[in-house]
Each structure stands twice: as structure tokens, then as C-alpha cells.
Amino acid sequence: MIILELKTNIKCNGCIAAIKPGLDATEGLTRWEVDLTDPDRKLTAEVDSEEVKENLIKTLEKAGYKAW
């Protein structure tokens, strides 16, 4: 299990609602959350592999968001 902390451009609960279906459907992503109180809007995620990390970032980009 790999724990990722990525900065994002997610700004509100509406943004989270927009990414939720895609992230929930991502295989190998067991848990995720976005800290809206953090200035970097960190996305913390538990993934099975580095490949899942790339899929997570692609899923965010498809929804119009970025993570780095």
C-alpha cells in the first residue's frame, strides 16, 4: 500500500463531487480525501501501485483538475 499526498487545484465541495465518481471507480485506489482547509488542497490517497497514481492523475485531468 502506497500513501500519496498530492497538491491539487480543487477548491470546494462541488469540485469534490465532480471528481468522486471517477476516483471511486479507479481500481487500486482504496481510500482518498481532499483537505480543503490546507492551502495546497492536498489529496491524500491509498493506492496499490505507482500505476494507480498515474490513473488517479488522469482521472482528475479528465474532470478538469490537476494534481502534482
Image: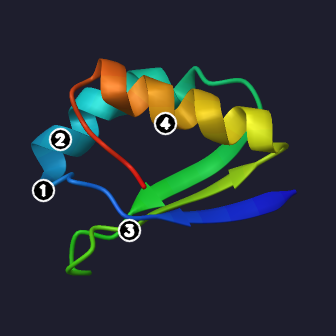
Q: The residue tagged with tag 2: helix, strand or loop?
A: helix
Q: Residues within 10 Å of mark 4 (few under 14, many from 20)?
A: some
* Residue that numbered label 4 is attached to: 57
Q: Where is residue 50 in the image (x, y as percent from the top left)?
A: 78, 43
Q: Tell me the quarter of the image containing the N terminus.
A: bottom right
Q: Which amino acid does label 2 sit on?
A: Cys
* Residue that numbered label 2 is attached to: 15
- Image coloring type: rainbow
Q: Position of residue 25 (x, y in %)?
A: 57, 20
Rounded to the nearest angstrom, the CA distance separating label 3 from label 4 is: 13 Å
Sequence-first tag of 4 and 2? 2
Q: Is 48 situated above or below 34?
A: above
Residue positioned 23% across, 29% down in the render? 18
Q: Which amino acid does label 4 sit on?
A: Ile
Sequence-first tag of 3 and 4? 3
* Residue that numbered label 3 is attached to: 42
For residue 61, which quarter of the picture? top left
Q: Decide: marks 4, 2 in contact (CB < 8 A)?
A: no
Q: The residue tagged with tag 3: helix, strand or loop?
A: loop
Q: How crowded is mark 1: few (under 14 residues within 10 Å), some or many (20 or more)?
A: some
